[in-house]
Amino acid sequence: MTAGDGQTAGAGTPGASTMEQLLRELAPQVLGAVARRHGDFAAAEDAVQEALIAAAEQWPAQGIPTNPRGWLYRVALRRLTDQLRSEAARRRREEAVAGALRPGW
C-alpha cells in the first residue's frame, strides 16, 4: 500500500521475529473478518494466506504499515475478489463452450 491509500510504512525495517509474531497475532482476526464478510471460510482462508505472503514479502523492505490489520484485511479482500471474479469468468467460459456443443448432439 502507499501513503495515498492511507497506509504508510512504519519507521524502520521490522525484525523477522517481530513481524512473524505480529502476523501470527493478526491472521486469525483477519480470517474471521473476511470469512464473516463473504461467508466462505475456505476461500477466505486462501485469501488471507495470500495476504500474509504479500506482507512477508513487502514489509521487510517497506516497513510495517501503520495499520497492519487493515492492510492485511484490504489485501485479503482484494485477493478474494480477484479469485471470485476469476472463477465466475471461468464458469461463463465453460458454460459458453458447453452451450455451443449441445445443439450439435
Image (tube, rainbow, N blue to C red):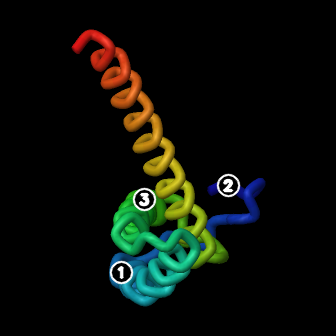
Snapshot quadrant of residue 1? bottom right
Q: Residues within 10 Å of mark 2 (few under 14, many from 20)?
A: few
| The quarter of the displayed image where residue 16 is located | bottom left
Mark 2 in CB contact with mark 1 (< 8 angstroms): no
Q: Is residue 100 above or below residue 25?
A: above
From what the image shows, is residue 62 above or below residue 21?
above
Residue drawn at point x = 47 percent, y = 50 percent: 84
Q: Which amino acid type is shown beneath numbered disc 2?
A: Thr
**Residue in the image at 35% along x and 15% along y:** 100
Marks 2/1: CA distance? 22 Å
Q: Residue at x 55, y 55 (%)?
A: 78
Q: Which badge, 2 or 1, is on the more N-terminal residue?
A: 2
Residue at 46 percent of width and 75 percent of height:
14
Q: Nearer the viewer, mark 1 or mark 3?
A: 3
In this figure, which residue is indicated by the disc labeled 2?
A: 2
Give 4 or 43, whichever is nearer the viewer.
43
User: Would you say residue 102 is visible in this rendering?
Assistant: yes
Coordinates of residue 48 in the picture (x, y in percent): 42, 68
Residue 4: percent from the left, percent from the top? Answer: 77, 54
> Which residue position is annotated with label 1?
20
Disc 3 secondary structure class? helix
- Could you tell me residue 15's position as x and y percent? 40, 78
Residue 78, above or below 72: above
Q: Which residue is mark 3?
A: 54
Looking at the image, is 83 positioned above or below residue 52?
Answer: above
**Which numbered mark, 3 or 2, is in the foreground of this view?**
3
In the rendered structure, the answer to whether residue 102 lies left or right of residue 12 reads left
User: Marks 3 and 2, how far apart in space?
Assistant: 14 Å
Residue closest to the eye, 1 or 12: 1
